[in-house]
Image (cartoon, grey):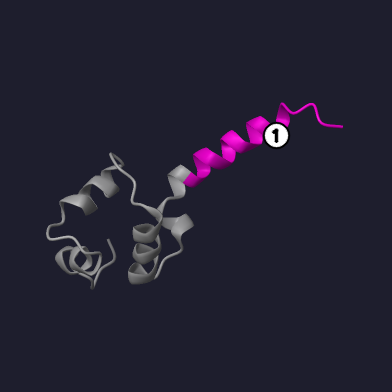
Amino acid sequence: MKRGLPRKKLAALLGHKTTSQLCRWEDGSQLPNLCNALLLSHFLQMPVEFLFKDLRNHLVRRTKHFQGTRNDP
């Protein structure tokens, strides 16, 4: 998480009483919903794509694979 914004404060801003949900998002065991992802982006002042770069890269690779297998003219 961004320095200068304590986890407890960030959790509270997102409507959570504890930081456990933030931990699940960080370790990848869960993903935030779109509203929480956008709020994280706002509060941390980082693009959503940066916050979820591994997931984004995986999806882009998967999409490129599917694009390469199309039989469209």
Q: Which residue is drawn at 41% across and 55% down?
A: 34
Q: Mark 1 points at which residue?
A: 67
Figure disc tally = 1
Instruction: Residue 34: say if magenta.
Output: no
Above/below status of 36 relative to 29: below
Instruction: Residue 63: say if magenta.
Output: yes
Amino acid type of the residue that numbered disc 1 sits on in the rendered structure: Gln
Compared across the picture, whether 23 is left or right of 54 comes to: left
Q: Give the extent of the magenta segment.
A: 56-73
Q: Is mark 1 on a helix, strand or loop?
A: helix
Q: In which quarter of the image is residue 45?
A: bottom left
Compared across the picture, whether 59 is left or right of 36 comes to: right
In percent of width and height, residue 63 lies at: 61, 37
In percent of width and height, residue 15 lies at: 21, 64
Q: Quadrant of residue 41?
A: bottom left
Above/below status of 18 relative to 71: below
Q: Which residue is drawn at 87% across and 32% down?
A: 73
Farthest right residue?
73
Q: Which residue is drawn at 50% across and 46% down?
A: 56
